[in-house]
Image: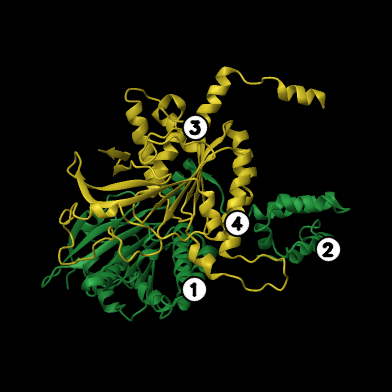
Chain colours: A green, B yellow
Amino acid sequence: MAPLKSLEAQYGILDSNFQSFCASNGIFTVEDFLLHDLSVLAAFAEQEPTSERLKEGITQVLSIIDRQHQPWLNGLQLLEDAQQNKHVLSTGFKGIDKLLEGGLREGQLTELVGPSSSGKTQLCLRVAANVAIQHKGRVIFLDTGNSFSPRRIEHFVRQISGSVFNEKVMSNILCHSTFDIFSMFDVLHQLENSLKSQGHKGDCKARTLIVDSISSLITPILGGSGPQGHALMTSAGFLLKKLAHELNIAVLVTNHMVAGEGGNLKPALGESWKSIPHVRLLLSRDQGNKTCSISILKHPSLASGEVARFVIDD
Amino acid sequence: MTMEVRGWIDGDESGREMLSRLLTERPYLHIPPFQKFPLRVGNVVELVGPSPCAKTHILMQAAIDCILPKHYGGLGHLVLFIDLDCRFDILRLSQMLRNRIFQANKNQSNDEELFVECMRRFLYIRCYDTLEFLATLKTLHYQLQKERQAQGIGVNFLMIDSIGAFHWVDRASTSLHLGVDNRKGLSLQNVSVTVVQEIKKLVLVHPMLVIAAKATILGNRYAANEVKWNLKRPFSPDSAASSVTNKVHQLMYREYMPSIWQSFVTLRILIQASDDHISTENNHNKSVYLSEWLMPPLSFGDSFIVKDAGVFCVS
């Protein structure tokens, strides 16, 4: 946040006298103001010779602070935003769409949990192809393990659009290889800036962001006794939710599974991650055939435990 | 001066005013897990539980009880909802509200008007980090004055979902030495002190009930209600039914909030999903949730399920 000095040019009231008064109370930036009891500060100002001007300065900073949170909205405004800007995107699998009442919702972070070869990546690729065709949207795919397959995408595209090869659709699916969490932050921040400046013009809106898999970026930084790994994980979660909401895109991430107690599998990202996504889905594949099962672990409006089955074909 | 003193001594409240003040100060909530306990304005209630355990649903239902007008069994006041998890689903709230209005109002036609009136009373803000949360609290007083002028009614509930959302980030940004001795860093401790201080000041001027949800973000190795990740039989919800529910009651949770917040909380309720399921009319299996009073340590708890229309008690 801004040092008070840098605000002087814009707000004359925050002059050098005000700055030195604040400095004597340990305040140098707007951020420092947030941690101070302003009524105590006003009482200190009272004892100064220029108390009126100092108090005016405090009010000025308060109005700057007032612009540093999101706007207050009432229920109607929220509902209007949800109905106009947050669409439901079909996944391309009838069973899953039925289970989720339409598919993935823009503005939400959806997580797929599943053991290795349960179909997580295939589902992601199929969703990418389907969103690019059915919803004419751009898809950003963050690939963390070289599992993105253009051939597979092409196959799905042909399958969905009736064996026509569609170059425009293919060019709307953008893949970034990211091998650590910091390069993911880079990509996401770039995305935020480019999408914000671009706005809604142009015929092709970004609709989906896929991170396959987010757990392989986060698990290496967890562990140890320090909180830094968890802090990065939480920040990544908030950034994804912010992008989903502010840019009206659906975010899909995958979480692999590792052996837990007693040889049972458990998700690689556990207790602290659980409260981050809007929707958690558990994927599993039947032994020996191509049928997959998907069930709801958590959903803001649907009961958990409901199951759908679907087939990923060759 | 004398006039002021006289005005202060003179009775200035009729019986009706007093009754309405008392009723406002004791917002009675008819929903589990609050229904058997007399809440009052000024209480700070904490709902603790592992995600997902219907915490946000309980908040939504309490919010609906607050924004509905008095003749519909509500309190007719404003609700402030501070969303720190950034997961709030307005479609769900509006669905529950419509359900409630429909039930109360079967043969009347002013449903839509009432719906709009109630939705206007629900005030929502989303915070993506601690700084936004602090900026929100710092300027909340002005916001409340504005709303009170615009709508002519006060706020009854302040909801925070959930209070530990930025815990790890705050914990990681500890005491870098900032060069000056009396300069405060953005540490977990300083943030909690400021949050508690700001809410205390706010509640003095605008008396309200504070309800904060808190997810148990620290894993409990021996948690009885961990979802079973046993993939040999992944989709048989009733396979292990009721075998572990006895253990659930003894489950401890690990506290992680700084002591300044802990001592600010006046009532604490623990909520968990049990392994029990109940079939409802549409043949849907609904998970049963259990609530338990930790503070004060009351002997009675509630069991409840979440249906389309909201949270319901089961006996």
Q: Which mark is residue B261?
A: none
Q: The residue under label 3 is which amino acid type?
A: Arg
Q: Which mark is residue A16?
A: 2
For the N terminus of chain A, the image quarter is: bottom right
Residue placed under numbered mark 4 in the picture? B193
Q: Are marks 2 and 3 in contact (CB under 8 Å)?
A: no
- Chain identity of mark 4: B
Label 1: which residue? A228
Q: Secondary structure at mark 4?
A: helix
Give amino acid for label 1. Gln
Amino acid at circle 4: Val
Mark 4 vs mark 2: in front: 4
Pick the quarter of the image with the C terminus of chain A: bottom left
**C-alpha span from label 4 to label 2:** 29 Å
Label 2 environment density (alpha carbons within 10 Å; few <14, some 14–19, many ≥20): few
Q: Is residue A49 left or right of residue A133?
A: right
At which x and y percent is residue A92?
25, 61
